[in-house]
Amino acid sequence: MTGFTAFPLRRALACTVILAGLGLAAASGATTTAPLACDITVDQTGRMVHFQGRVQATTPLSGTYSLTLSGGGTNLRQGGAFTAAAGEIVTLGQANLSGTPERYDVDMTLNVGGTIYNCAPNL
């Protein structure tokens, strides 16, 4: 599934440390695979914008999610538990709102086994 990311956007320094660690793992012959990929699709159709949170698991997993949308007088919060089989794409939350994507702030986080993943909008 292309365009999916699982990136802790607010933790650039931590990301640098993680990437350095992955480089060390690769140099030592170890392989590291992220357990998931996630994103928020944003589709404009006429005067409506469709937001959809998605996750794809590389191995079976379960966790919780939180999806928030705000802007233009809107303040939506969706969340709950999810499970995903290896290779499965799961829709975690969605909303149809009027206007343009730029009008809204959207954020989705996943908690899987105590690790927090920030999922970026796929614009």
Image: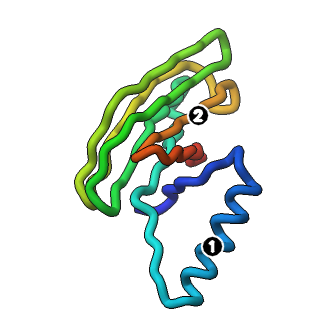
Taking depth in this image into account, of 6 and 27 the one nearest to the observer is 27
Horizontal side, residue 48 vs residue 60: left or right: right
Q: Position of residue 100 (x, y in %)?
A: 63, 28
According to the image, label 1 marks what residue? 21
Secondary structure under the numbered disc 1 in the rendered image: helix
Which residue is the site of mark 2? 107
Q: Position of residue 19 (x, y in %)?
A: 65, 69
Q: Is residue 99 above or below residue 123?
A: above
Q: Earlier in the sequence, mark 1 or mark 2?
A: 1
Residue sitting at x 43%, y 34%: 65
Report the residue that reaches farthest toward the left. Answer: 85
Q: Residues within 10 Å of mark 1 (few under 14, many from 20)?
A: few
User: Going by the image, does 88 lie left or right of 23?
Assistant: left
Q: Given the image, on which type of amino acid does mark 2 rest? A: Asp
Report x, y in % for residue 4. 49, 56
| Quadrant in the picture for residue 52 | top left
Residue positioned most to the right: 13
